[in-house]
Amino acid sequence: MDLSVDVQLDLHRRMVRIRLFEEAAGRLAESNRLPGFLHLYVGEEAVAAGVCGALNDDDHITSTHRGHGHLVAKGGDFNRMMAELMGKATGYCKGKGGSMHISDTSLGMLGANGIVGAGSPIAVGAAFANRYRGRGQVAVAFFGDGSTNIGAFHEAANMACALHLPIVFACENNEYGEFTPRDKTMAITDIVDRAAGYGMPGVIVDGMDVIAVHEAAVEAVERARSGGGPSLIEAKTYRFYNHHGVQNLGLKYRSDDEVAMWKQRDPIFTLEDRMIENKAATRDQFDAIWAELRADIDTAIAFADESPYPTPDQIMVGVYTSMTGAQ
Amino acid sequence: MDLSVDVQLDLHRRMVRIRLFEEAAGRLAESNRLPGFLHLYVGEEAVAAGVCGALNDDDHITSTHRGHGHLVAKGGDFNRMMAELMGKATGYCKGKGGSMHISDTSLGMLGANGIVGAGSPIAVGAAFANRYRGRGQVAVAFFGDGSTNIGAFHEAANMACALHLPIVFACENNEYGEFTPRDKTMAITDIVDRAAGYGMPGVIVDGMDVIAVHEAAVEAVERARSGGGPSLIEAKTYRFYNHHGVQNLGLKYRSDDEVAMWKQRDPIFTLEDRMIENKAATRDQFDAIWAELRADIDTAIAFADESPYPTPDQIMVGVYTSMTGAQ
Amino acid sequence: MADERKLAYVMAFNEAVKQQMEADPNVFCAGEDIGAFGGVFGTFGGLQARFGADRVVDTPISEQAIVGLGVGAAVTGLRPIVDLMFMDFICVALDQIVNQAAKLKYMFGGDAVLPLTITTAGGGGLSAAAQHSQSLEALLCHIPGLKVVMPSNPYDMKGLMTACIQENNPTVMIKHKRLLGMTGHVPEESYSIPLGKGNILRPGKDVSIVAYARMANEALVAAEELAKDGIDCEIIDPRTLQPLDTDLIVSSVKKTNHAVVVHEAVRFGGLGGEIASQIQELAFDYLDAPVTRIGAPFSPVPFSPALEQHYIPNAKTIVQGVRDVMARV
Amino acid sequence: MADERKLAYVMAFNEAVKQQMEADPNVFCAGEDIGAFGGVFGTFGGLQARFGADRVVDTPISEQAIVGLGVGAAVTGLRPIVDLMFMDFICVALDQIVNQAAKLKYMFGGDAVLPLTITTAGGGGLSAAAQHSQSLEALLCHIPGLKVVMPSNPYDMKGLMTACIQENNPTVMIKHKRLLGMTGHVPEESYSIPLGKGNILRPGKDVSIVAYARMANEALVAAEELAKDGIDCEIIDPRTLQPLDTDLIVSSVKKTNHAVVVHEAVRFGGLGGEIASQIQELAFDYLDAPVTRIGAPFSPVPFSPALEQHYIPNAKTIVQGVRDVMARV
Ligand SMILES: Cc1ncc(C[n+]2csc(CCOP(=O)(O)OP(=O)(O)O)c2C)c(N)n1
Ligand SMILES: Cc1ncc(C[n+]2csc(CCOP(=O)(O)OP(=O)(O)O)c2C)c(N)n1
Ligand SMILES: [Mg+2]
Ligand SMILES: [Mg+2]
């Protein structure tokens, strides 16, 4: 596949938006301006961007605890995201969800999720509904390597295959679940080895190469859309920061060398270098993009800062669709 | 492997014991003398017998809702089994468990289980304890094809492999989960395809051939015992009666031809024919065995019949190890 | 009336599903063995033949994914009915019920609608032992975001099941296994009973018995017995346990000054504690005796009928409980 | 005493585990990130270094298999401690807890011993939102076969955790996340506090406040405030919720004639309903006012601190609740 410059720039833009949002969130967290847990997506941008770049607006995705990247890639609004992270009333979830539940159903983003593995069965439901309606929509389940050890993932993968649903399973294999390396929690190296057990095709891609991810995603999405059923994409990637927050907490669980090696393969800079080399873009162009999006982030932070907190009378609002069940 | 006549006769005996017990239980159920659900093992005897024949007394097994066969194969006592099925105080579980929870921890049989898939994680625990103690014991998890779609199976299989435990996963693939055929609930044909996803070896055996099952089990058990880790055996088999009870309930979900075809491959008669052909045994010998074991069943039914029901004051006994927590 | 239309509880469920599926193409069903086989209790009988395998879906044995299928389909616009064969199996799927279905809307700041019905079968009395006989409604009623329904008769079953399917929030409809064959008057036309509205099954003036599902019927039997002693029982069937019709219960107790709460679930930590607490909070000055709770003892459900019949509360235990309350001075 | 030994709640837990592992080679621990990393809350810190990776085991993210590992190892003779990082995750593993661990012994006719300790961390106050802040103890206390423990301070933590590990039944030890850093006197030598014995944290004569985990500490603060009004609170911390020290609670209420039950869990269907019901059942004639229950409102736990601080009960809400009870005529 030869991707047009426009598509490459689109993928680049999605990645830079994620990067800037996450770096900003990390800085705010470090200065104690964000309540709660924060799981940053920095380093893994190529996965969300490459996959969501292959989706239509009315396709659905489910996400994980590490969900900002997915929402940004699906078109999330910086202002409402930043406000949500700060727990403000103007946030995506009106301050009720926070980082771990950030969502925008109008963009088909069915929520970050605090329960490892729980998003995948929900994606299966969305895929079922999509086929049921017959408008050609697909669903993508994002999930981590660690989450493939939990029952919900397994049930979702099998059910999707048994019902032959229009779904793509997109695995972010960053080699760790929290602070524990993959080899302590599974006896296999490649998550894709699990695909055959469900009867779906699987492919490994370089998760630091957005073009590679995107090409695999286009193929998988096209398969799903045209009735070819589920498939699995395993993107080998890495998170540059800690499991949550920015700094390593407590004991060191990854070597400096390992982190440095992966950082050299930064998905954004890799793409920029390649596009410049291919004369598809210039450094100045990229600088302008970064500057433009940086300004958006500043706007978002200001928006969030100035936004009001929700008031206590909002606690009971939104539990039920029409408020009848509460006591 | 050339199995000695003694071993063949031992496997035969285990199978006949299962057959006779189950046929008797089925008859009692049809005349409404057994309360509750009854899931018969008839047709699948070669699996329990072949595998348990490869185990020592102090090895552990976990079982399923279809658990009588496993307990008989592990050496279960007819009297206490039959009494339990009738809900009598002299039963294995003092009438508290019944068919779905029949168990004998002194034989390492850690219970039939009413929750599909729930036995496998418990087997993993037993395997962990066995390695921890270092006395060379192994654990076997029996489970059905349908149960491999549930999360607990997946987590157990993966954990066993991650921790490299002395365990054998023994799948009874009878092609149905209750009244629904395999192809409606999974997109694969062979359960063994799942083994690679955990990083363990897997093998398909003819589950109607007790010798084949036994040879595979000996190899898997030996691997586990000697530190070689988990493996999976998929035995292709069939249940001759209904999912529960004896007669097909409601709609017919299996064709007469299909049932007849499998019945022709009866694991007991197949073995008998082969042993007679090989001059390893005679029809008279077999007749004597059947007669002897039939008498045991008659004794068991009489024992169970004559046994008292538990009295209401027993309801609160056995909830806690020393009765302190009850209100 | 001699010629009123009678239907079994299980068929009342079936008819509600059928009528709603006819009325709304977004309604579909999924669960184990519900398609070709019609469900192990026959609850979904005939529906696949009528509506096709796309709308009445046989699933793998994957309770988490079954509920997840419902959550994902509901939040993207369908009205799923997903079945968990036995109520005990909610434990396998509880994350999807409690952490996903119940909370999604709230966590999204209200930006989600979940018209999801989870159906299951609870209760004992079939010698089905500890993992197939539980009454675990207390676990669900404690969870904001869910509605919980337990009908005691065919008429309520149809009306409440219709309401569940039409409801825009996740509901759990709990059939009682021992009531499946119970017959009673059920109109053919579609009707719904509002969730959260209880029902006075028998008016009375001396004592209020709050009882649901099978226990409501046991209470009716007990009331006849007690009437012989001159004790006139008012029997309230809340029908929906979440939200609970507190007003109905409290106003009854204010009249009778005596209350007995009955459920089949284990007494300790059961919903009876909530109901009794609400009664004493809101009708303290009207109570002539403490609110009595009747429930199963603190043990798993035993298998043997010889034990189980003494384990599950029944008309006799209710008679005794009411007598004790009335005897108090 | 100035020189008494102080320890944080989290280290009291850690020390109990360490001492029991030293005392009994059959004790081992398993859970996510508990090995090399020492657990996300540091609860298992240093234990793998001391006892090795065979006894302090990092597991996959597989809560069902983690509890199953514990069940299988316990029933075959070990004394497992298995950790579920957050209490909300019991929903993922509930089948193994409720249908297996709790019932195995009973279903086997008593022929099993399950010395299994499940540890987890509950409670809110960290802006961890709806899936990482719950107090779900009511779900567990309703299940025959389990014991449930929620310590409110470091001293109790060590003694109760020691008791859990030594106990021959499945126990669930619920740490409160907001108490992890709380320091207090903790003797170095091993000691255990019997499960099922509550504690009078503060003697008083006017009103009995039953409160556990973090709420016990809030109640202590409230009591100081109320003392200024001349209201003398007796604070009872049941410590173990299953079995519950009913005697201690009831005898206190018989003395004070007023009762307030406090928990952080959602009020509706919470354990407060059980406690309040028992009080009115057993001390009806002593009550001058209805038993009041304080708990969270009927919504999931909101994320924003601006909401969460009003969601979780605290000293102020307790003061108000007690004043209301005392003001009643
Ligand atoms: C059911 C459940 N178990 C444990 C956790 C705690 N937890 C949060 S993230 C995480 C690691 C997930 O690893 P992976 O799926 O590889 O995603 P990654 O964080 O690497 O992106 C764990 C164990 C949880 N949130 N839910
Ligand atoms: C968690 C759970 N879901 C559903 C059931 C109901 N059920 C009992 S046996 C069974 C079929 C199991 O199929 P399989 O594992 O293939 O075993 P088989 O009956 O064929 O031996 C089902 C669905 C159950 N007991 N537990
Ligand atoms: Mg990971
Ligand atoms: Mg099967």
Image (tube, coloured by chain):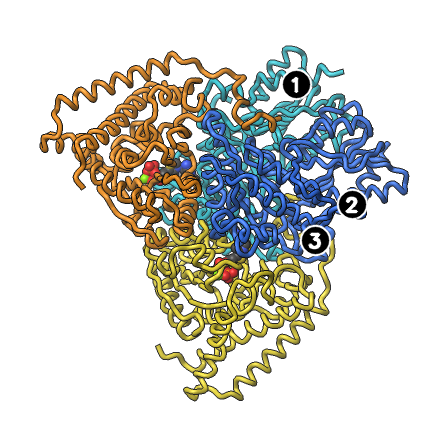
Chain colours: A yellow, B orange, C cyan, D blue
Three-letter amino acid code at disc 1? Val
Distance between the Cα atoms at labels 2 and 3?
14 Å
Residue, disc 3? D308
- Measure the C-alpha gap from mark 2 to mark 1: 37 Å
* Dot 2: element: helix
Q: Which mark is residue C322?
A: 1
Closer-to-camera residue (D124/C273): D124
Task: Check if mark 2's residue and mark 3's residue have beta carbons within 8 Å.
Answer: no
Residue B38 point in image, percent of width and height: 36, 27
Q: Position of residue A226 (x, y in %)?
A: 34, 63
> Can residue D137 be seen at all in this image of the molecule?
yes
The chain that hosts pointer 1 is C
**Mark 3: few, some, or many residues within 10 Å (few <14, many ≥20)?**
many
Residue at (40% x, 64% y) in the render: A234
Separation of marks 1 and 3 at Cα, in angstroms: 43 Å
Local crowd size for mark 1, using a 10 Å CA cut-off: few (<14), some (14–19), many (≥20):
many
Q: How many marks?
A: 3
Task: Describe the element under mark 3 as helix, strand or loop.
Answer: helix
For badge 2, the amino acid type reads Thr
* Residue in the picture at 63% in, 55% down: D128
The residue where tag 2 is placed is D317
Quarter of the image for the C terminus of chain D: give it: top right
Q: Residue at x 27, y 25 (%)?
A: B17
Local packing at callout 2 (Cα closer than 10 Å; few below 14, some 14-19, many 20+) is some
- List x then y, in percent, for residue A36: 64, 59
Residue B112 vertical placement versus D307 (above, below): above
The answer to which quarter of the image holds residue D172 is top right
Q: Quadrant of the N terminus of chain D?
A: top right
**Relative side of B196 to D132, left or right:** left
